[in-house]
Image: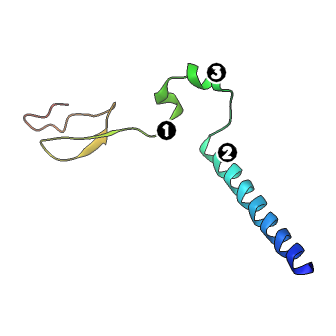
Amino acid sequence: MTRLLVLFALIAVVFWLAARRAADLAARLGLRRSDPARQEAEPQAEKSPIESMVECPVCGIWQPGRRAKGCGRNGCPY
């Protein structure tokens, strides 16, 4: 019985530490829980720090989609 209690205590400590680390990571990344109504009101681009990348068909350089700048070569669409 004692072994079972010790095992349960160890599992509880591991889960507690994992939840604490996840909360610290979310705080460092600026993620936070908020109500669903507020999340729906915010535009999708502001909620996600991830931005799509586009490749220049002329030179092959990858750039952020909304901030793509021309590479200076002939035929560059940016």
Q: What's under tag 3, amino acid-wise?
A: Ala
Q: Quadrant of residue 18?
A: bottom right
Q: In this view of the protein, which residue sits in the foreground, 23 or 6?
A: 6
Q: What's under tag 1, amino acid-wise?
A: Pro
Q: Is residue 25 above or below residue 56?
A: below
State the residue lying farthest toward the right.
2
User: Which of labels 2 and 3 is toward the front?
Assistant: 3
Q: Is residue 38 left or right of residue 50?
A: right
Place of residue 25 in the rendered image (x, y in percent of width and height, measured from the top left): 64, 51
Q: Which residue is mark 3?
A: 37
Q: Is residue 73 above or below residue 16?
A: above
Q: Which residue is mark 2?
A: 27
Q: Which residue is mark 1?
A: 49
Residue sitting at x 40%, y 38%: 51
> What quarter of the picture does the C terminus occupy?
top left
Q: Earlier in the sequence, mark 1 or mark 2?
A: 2
State the residue lying farthest toward the front.
1
> How far, Cα to Cα, is label 2 from label 3?
21 Å
Residue sitting at x 8%, y 34%: 75
